Amino acid sequence: MDQVKIGKFIAECRKENSLTQAQLAEMLRITDRAVSKWETGKSMPDSSIMLELCEILKINVNELLSGERITMENYDKKAEENLLEMKRQKEESDKRLLKTEYVIGYIASISFFILIFTASFIEMPTFVRIILIALGFVLFIVGVSYCLSIEQKTGYYECQKCGHRYVPKYSSVFLAMHVNRTRYMKCPKCHQKSWQKKVIGKE
């Protein structure tokens, strides 16, 4: 989606409705700085306020995401294009998050080993040694938990028995045996256990 085009369209519709940025922001219970960022293409309206924004600007969500008025004959085509673009953007975002997971995992693991090594082999007071060991475990646990949270919510897992793709519960991911991002879990559709691979797209 073209954020700059969408931003210009929001500004145009706002002016058509004789609203200032401050007035629009007040109606949406946000800051006028947020409205300014939309109109300059620096950010997009949050999905939680899109419907309210469209109602105020007298447009529909499809027109908002297209950044232009849409005639009825082009409506279905634009809706499909917007859905495909949103799907593509989500997949790109998921890929970036999965790369972030690796970085956080490496940092947490290296920090853990450095702190444990330091506490084990360097002379220091006992209380300092205990603090370093405790800090190492805390960093490792927090890092791994955050990585699991990213992995659980990003993309889907695909059942090898029936091909169903789904987002499992955090507890299922946490307790499952795994090899890298492939986990042994029970499919909610066929109820069979299999080694399920992490995939990005729903279909």
Image: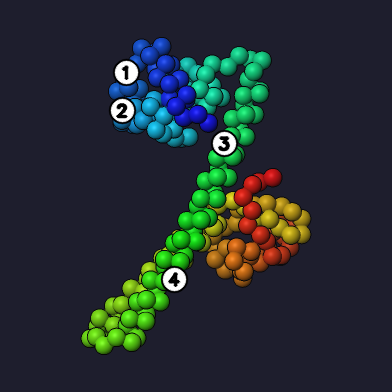
Direction from residue 84 to residue 129 in the image, left or right: left
Q: What residue is at 64 percent from the left and 47 percent from the top? A: 201
Identify the secondary structure beneath mark 3.
helix
Q: Position of residue 127 (x, y in %)?
A: 24, 83
Using the numbered discs, state the Cα–Cα distance from disc 2 to disc 1 in whole angstroms.
Answer: 9 Å
Marker disc for residue 32:
2
Disc 2 and disc 4 in contact, CB within 8 angstroms: no
Quadrant of the rendered image containing residue 37:
top left
The secondary element bearing badge 2 is classed as: helix
The three-letter amino acid code for the residue at tag 2 is Asp
Residue assigned mark 4? 109
Q: CA distance from mark 2 to mark 3?
A: 26 Å
The numbered mark, 3 or 1, whose residue comes first in the sequence reads 1
Q: In the rendered picture of this protein, how many numbered marks are placed on residues? A: 4
Sequence-earlier tag: 2 or 3: 2
At x 58%, y 17%, the residue is: 70
Q: Locate the C terminus and report the quarter of the image it occupies.
A: top right
- Give the Cα separation between the discs numbered 2 and 4: 43 Å
